[in-house]
Amino acid sequence: MSNTTADEQNGRIGRTRDFLGALAHTHRINLVGIEFLTGIIEDHPNRVYHGVKERPDSNLIIRGELANYCIPLEPIFQAFTNPFSEDCNLGIPMVEVHPLGKWVRYPAHACIQPNGHSQIPGTDSIGILITALISDRELFANQSQAPFRNALVKTYGMIHSPISEVLAKSLKDLYGATIDFAIGEISIKGTHGFTWHLGGAHDPSVTSYSLSSSVRGGTHRVHTADTFHSMGSCKDLSYLLPTLSQSPRIFLSDDDYDLTKSPEILSSVAKIWAPLRKAIDSGEIELLDSSDSE
C-alpha cells in the first residue's frame, strides 16, 4: 500500500522547484512584453512619449486621431514593483482624455479594460492599450467601450468636433439613432409611431438631456427638461437609446426600467398615449409622487 504522507514529502522539492520556475516565467514573459512595448514607441515616436513631469506625477502621452491621452505611470510602476502594496490598484489605470490641440486642467477620464487581458502579461496589456489609443477611431467604434465614448462626448460635447463623424456613425451602427449637431439633439425611433429626442446639449443649464417625443412626424412634446432630475441613468446613452427604442411599449411592461419609474415622464407620456393613460387610470400602473421616487 502506498504511503501518501511519504509520497507528499518526496514530491516537495519538485513542487517547490516548479513554483520558482513559474515565478521566473512571469518575469521572462514581461521582459518580452517590454520589447513589444518598446517597438510600439519606436514606431510612433511623435505620438507616444513620456511627458515632462517626473515621478510620482509622470505620464505616458498618446496622441490619437480624436483626442490626446495621458496614462499615469506611477500606478503601473507600483503594480510591477510590489503588487501586494496597499497603494497598488488592480487593473489598468484610468486614462485622462484631453481635446486635440490643448491640455485641460480637469479632463474626462476613461476606464479601458479590454476583455481577456487577465491571461496575458501586464506589459503586453500596456502595449495593447497604447495601440488602441493610437487607433482611437476603432476603439470608439468598439461596442464594449462605452466608457471611452462617454469620456470623448464629455470632452467635446455634441458639437462639430474631431469626434463628430465617428460619433454619428457609432450612434447609427449601435443603436439606429441619428444626431443633429447644429441643435445638439439625438433622435431614435421607438414603438407605436414615436420618435424620441434627447436634446439640451447646447444649453448650459441642462445637466444631462432634455427628453421629448414626436408621433409620426408631429410636433415635439417635452417630457422632462432635464433627465438629471428624473432618472438615475440620466446621461448614459448605452442605456437611454436602447430603452427609448422600445418605448412607449415598455411603459406597460412589468420589467424594471429606470425610465418608466419617473412620475414626471410617466404622466407626460400618458397625456399623448392612451394605453398608458388607461393603465394609470385603472390603477394597473401606480403613478408615484415625485417625492416618493427620490
Image (spheres, rainbow, N blue to C red):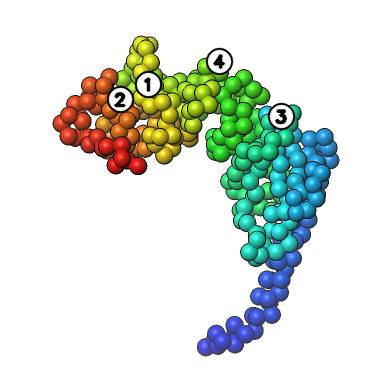
The disc placed on residue 268 is 2
Q: Which residue is mark 4?
A: 182
Rounded to the nearest angstrom, the CA distance separating label 1 from label 4 is 19 Å
Sequence order check, earlier mark of 1 and 3 = 3
The disc placed on residue 27 is none
Q: Residue at x 70, y 45 (%)?
A: 71
- 174 is higher (above) or lower (below) than 59: above
Q: Quadrant of the C terminus?
A: top left
Within the image, what quadrant is residue 42 found in?
top right
Residue 123: horizontal and vertical position, in percent? 72, 51
Rounded to the nearest angstrom, the CA distance separating label 1 from label 3 is 35 Å
Q: Amino acid at mark 3?
A: Leu
Residue situated furthest left in the rendering: 282
Q: Which residue is mark 1?
A: 222
Q: Residue at x 55, y 15 (%)?
A: 182
Residue 158: horizontal and vertical position, in percent? 56, 24
